């Protein structure tokens, strides 16, 4: 059986600019997909490294998101907490092709139990 490496998760124009949406993973960790002001798309596990706040509900600015619970800034590029804070959330590789968003199957499913 051939398994696609990339999962098509829909058109990029349905993702609000400077916003996010979530993608449930059956048996795994929910993923947050972010769209930055300059049109880039990033994906992280939807759990702040501090106390698991829903990063998808945070505010996107440049290439980071501010957690809605205690205002940690998390890099969308590396998943690391910025500034004084320490912690890291897994990043899911993303690519945009033909106006559609694809995420790496391997990393997307890695949290599956
Ligand atoms: S849970 Fe995100 S800053 Fe505390």
Image: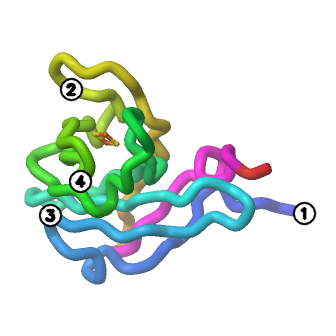
Q: Quadrant of the N terminus?
A: bottom right
The segment highlighted magenta reads 99-111
Q: Which one is earlier in the sequence, the residue at label 4 or at label 3?
A: 3
- Which residue is label 4 attached to? 68
Indicate which label's residue lies in the foreground, 1 or 3. Answer: 3
Residue 93: in magenta span: no
Instruction: Name the side, left or right, on which 109 lies relative to 1.
Output: left
Instruction: Name the side, left or right, on which 90 lies relative to 29.
Output: left
Q: Position of residue 89 (x, y in %)?
A: 44, 36
Q: Is the residue at mark 4 in contact range of ligand 1, meaning its CB lies under 8 Å from it?
A: yes
Q: CA distance from mark 4 to mark 3?
A: 15 Å
Q: Which one is earlier in the sequence, the residue at label 1 or at label 4?
A: 1
Indicate which label's residue lies in the foreground, 4 or 2. Answer: 4
The disc placed on residue 1 is 1
- Which residue is label 3 attached to? 18
- Whether pointer 4 and pointer 3 mark residues with C-beta atoms closer than 8 Å, the reply is no
Q: Position of residue 37 (x, y in %)?
A: 9, 59
The disc placed on residue 82 is 2
Q: CA distance from mark 4 to mark 2?
A: 15 Å
Indicate which label's residue lies in the foreground, 1 or 4. Answer: 4
Q: Position of residue 33 (x, y in %)?
A: 37, 61
């Amino acid at each position: 059986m051939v398994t696609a490496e990339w999962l098509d998760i829909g058109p990029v124009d349905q993702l609000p600019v400077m916003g996010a949406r979530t993608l449930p993973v059956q048996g795994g960790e929910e993923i947050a997909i972010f769209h930055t002001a300059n049109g880039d798309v990033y994906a992280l596990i939807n759990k702040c490294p501090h106390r698991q706040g829903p990063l998808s509900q945070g505010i996107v600015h440049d290439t980071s998101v501010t957690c809605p619970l205690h205002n940690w800034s998390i890099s969308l590029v590396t998943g690391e907490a910025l500034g004084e804070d320490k912690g890291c959330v897994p990043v899911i590789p993303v690519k945009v092709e033909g106006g559609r968003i694809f995420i790496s199957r391997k990393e997307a499913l890695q949290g599956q139990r």
